[in-house]
Image (cartoon, coloured by chain):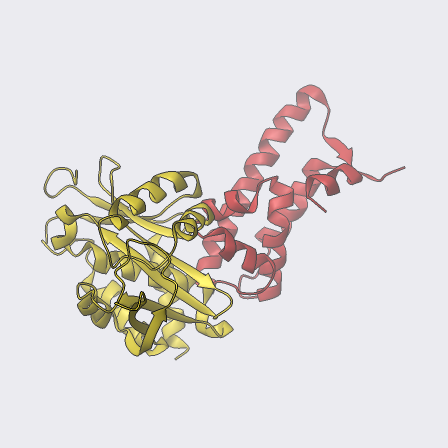
Amino acid sequence: MAGEPGSALVFFKFPIQAASLAFSFHCSIAKSDPHLRLRSVDEIRMFAEEGELFGVRSAASNVLALCYAALDESSNEYEVGGLAVLPEVQQLGVASVLARFAIAHIIANDRPWHYGYRIVAYVHEDNQNPRALVDRLGFQHIGRFTLKNAVTSTMKQNPKGEVMGDKFEFPRACVKQLLNWFEKEFRNLLRDGVTPAIVELKPGGLQSIIEALRQEAAEL
Amino acid sequence: MPATISRTEELRGLLTRATTLDVRDDAEFQNVMREAPGVLEMSEKQIADALSVSRPTFNRWINGKTLPHVAMRTPAVQWLIQELNTRIKNRTAHSRGSGSDSYTYAEGLVAMGR
């Protein structure tokens, strides 16, 4: 499904017109992943219809990965979550690029700290897979969370019927680290050093995002 | 009797403001973007998609709740200028044939959802 070895993967913001495709992909992954919450089906559908999803596709336009980045105005938090990557491309570091892309997009277009918002991520207590990535991105552990009324039956619950996990925050001080990654480490190639990673972003392209990160870093 | 304005004049008016816009000026950027859906006759969702932002993000821009970094404003305004120019060009070509370049101001307000 990922296409020929070495063929480019495209990182993009899911267009609102493709909401149903994004939603189908999320559901297909979430069904078999007991940790992938933490949002109800209706919430994911809403993210798709509002254009709050970021994705990765193959040259043949197959969806390979997805995550959302959305503001919860009641808590003043932008949450990056729902990160789901097909097994066949997991070794390429797709999640790492996609998450950075989503965070950078928030910083560039919403300037969260300027308006009193923060960027957070939630990880299920039994889900070890994303913790190294969350740490590498610069997120800091800020506490625990408990969902007393689990939103879907597929989510792993403790004996009390609760879903528990950890809450992380992406601190503003890590903008420089993120900028450094885009400027010096991301060479438009994935981890294998062969597969091109193309960031597709109208109208200004990745360069405008990087310039925005520079502006943010300069304000620190 | 309602005042009559040229549709092309409306497009040209926003074009002038967009081309002379100082993107570092928060209020100017917000005002120009706020007028874009009505003048372009596009929904917030359509414009958000064109600018690769979410509909809520674009909505926050035009309501002044949040604004993007200056680096993101320039390509957004350039896109707007291109859209306005395309519409002006199309209308100019069309009106040469039909002479129907005017509409009432009241109709314009309805089209903008006011």
In the rendered view, tell whether residue A153 sits above or below residue A178: above
Depth check, front residue: B74 or A137: A137
Residue A57 in the image: state x and y as whole percent: 25, 43
| Residue ranking furthest to the top | B97
Rendering quarter of residue A191: bottom left
The chain whose colour is yellow is A
Q: How many labels does the image show?
A: 0
| Residue at (57, 43) in percent of width and height | B43
Q: Quadrant of residue A153?
A: bottom left
Q: Which image quadrant: the C terminus of chain A?
A: bottom left
**Residue found at the very far right of the displayed protein:** B1
Quadrant containing the N terminus of chain A is: top left
The chain coloured red in the image: B
Q: In the figure, is residue A216 to the left or right of A159?
A: right
**Residue A161 to residue B34: above or below:** below
Residue at 60%, 55% (x, y): give it: B20
Q: Position of residue A12 (x, y in %)?
A: 32, 48
Query: Residue A4, percent across and down?
Result: 12, 38
Where on the picture, by quarter, is residue A145?
bottom left
Q: Is residue B30 above or below residue B39?
A: below
Q: Position of residue A30 (x, y in %)?
A: 27, 50
Q: Which residue is outermost to the front?
A: A159
Q: Nearer the viewer, residue B12 or A192?
A: A192
- Tell me the residue at 58%/59% (across/down): B29
